[in-house]
Image (cartoon, rainbow, N blue to C red):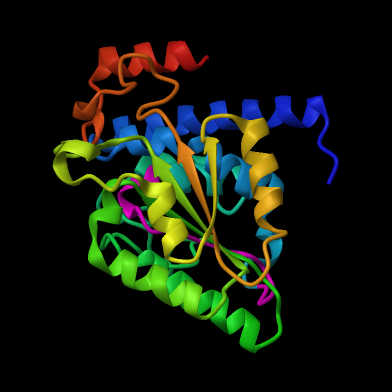
């Protein structure tokens, strides 16, 4: 797949629009998790607009690639991406987390177009992704499965049980992406419950491991293409990101893990993103 400078520019523009939508969602609902949603925006942009085999007009295609947002509290990022990709009108984003809205605090596969798996209970997403990837192989469909996990989430024991299973079943159509922004709700990941050295741990569980700047569109495309060539074992991408990326006063600030901006902060963020 040849990527042009124009392609990269368009992806960067798309990522900016998604970030604006994230701020709009969290401000409108006065609830949500902007920090971790903004950190993974570039990852979702590259997946949904460049890498994944998907079509909003054929959202139930059995051969489509699958995506599981294991860090379900970052739902604002997924909803903004799906709306930008055409799965539902962007106007719906203003109903984020409001009573009666389809856009709940965590992804719901029964009510939200484009959501492949309901999630939110941290640590469980990789187990589900394993099942999807295994079924793809057993049925001979060949679709790929992408699972985005949070760095704090990796503290959950179930993640490592699932990692062991992924390796055991040689799920080379599975790609785990770690949003490694190094902050969780209680503080720095390495202080709350260190998961590092992460690359060596994932390698010891049988993964082909890549490390990348998770906020760099060019690097993400390159590494995701490499992951597609891995055979006989699952792949993992450690995406080093900045929590709150794109809004200066939110960047690397743990307080913005789960807090909505007030009107002044909303205006400042939207002005910066414009």
Q: Which residues are magenta?
A: 61-76
| Residue 65 magenta-highlighted | yes
The answer to whether residue 160 is above or below residue 12 is below
The residue lying at 52 percent from left, 80 percent from top is 169
Left or right relative to 140: residue 152 = left
The answer to whether residue 95 is above or below residue 34 is below
Specify the quadrant of the image occupied by residue 230: bottom right
Asked whether the viewer can see residue 177, the reply is: yes
| Residue 147 magenta-highlighted | no
Residue 221: % across, % down = 68, 41
Asked whether the viewer can see residue 184, the reply is: no
Left or right relative to 219: residue 245 = left
Specify the quadrant of the image occupied by residue 123: bottom left
- Residue ranking furthest to the bottom: 138
The residue lying at 24 percent from left, 35 percent from top is 257
Residue 129: % across, % down = 47, 70
The answer to whether residue 66 is above or below residue 268 is below
Residue 269: % across, % down = 38, 16
> Which sits in the foreground, 231 or 154?
231
The residue lying at 30 percent from left, 49 percent from top is 73
Left or right relative to 218: residue 101 = left
> Which sits in the foreground, 122 or 272?
122
The residue lying at 42 percent from left, 25 percent from top is 245
> Which sits in the foreground, 171 or 16?
171
Report the label total. Answer: 0
Specify the quadrant of the image occupied by residue 31: top left
Residue 228: % across, % down = 69, 58
């Amino acid at each position: 797949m040849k990527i042009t400078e124009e392609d990269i520019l368009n992806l960067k523009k798309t990522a900016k629009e998604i970030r604006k939508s994230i701020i709009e969602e969290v401000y409108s609902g006065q609830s949500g998790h902007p920090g971790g949603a903004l950190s993974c925006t570039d990852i979702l942009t590259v997946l949904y607009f460049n890498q994944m085999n998907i079509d909003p007009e054929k959202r139930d295609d059995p051969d489509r690639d699958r995506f599981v947002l294991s860090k379900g509290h970052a739902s604002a990022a997924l909803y903004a991406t799906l709306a930008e990709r055409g799965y539902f009108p962007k106007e719906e984003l203003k109903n984020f987390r409001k009573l009666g809205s389809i856009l709940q605090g965590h992804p719901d596969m029964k009510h939200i177009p484009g959501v492949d798996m309901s999630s939110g209970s941290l640590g469980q997403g990789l187990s589900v992704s394993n099942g999807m990837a295994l079924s793809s192989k057993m049925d001979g469909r060949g679709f790929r499965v992408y699972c985005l996990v949070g760095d704090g989430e990796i503290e959950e024991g179930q993640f490592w049980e699932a990692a062991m299973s992924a390796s055991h079943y040689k799920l080379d159509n599975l790609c785990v992406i770690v949003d490694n922004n190094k902050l969780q709700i209680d503080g720095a990941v390495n202080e709350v419950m260190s998961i590092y050295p992460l690359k060596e741990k994932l390698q010891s569980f049988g993964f082909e491991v890549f490390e990348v700047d998770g906020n760099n569109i060019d690097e993400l495309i390159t590494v995701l293409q490499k992951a597609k060539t891995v055979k006989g074992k699952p792949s993992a991408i450690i995406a080093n990101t900045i929590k709150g990326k794109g809004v200066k006063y939110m960047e690397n600030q743990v307080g913005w893990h789960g807090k909505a901006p007030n009107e002044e902060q909303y205006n400042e963020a939207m002005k910066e993103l414009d």
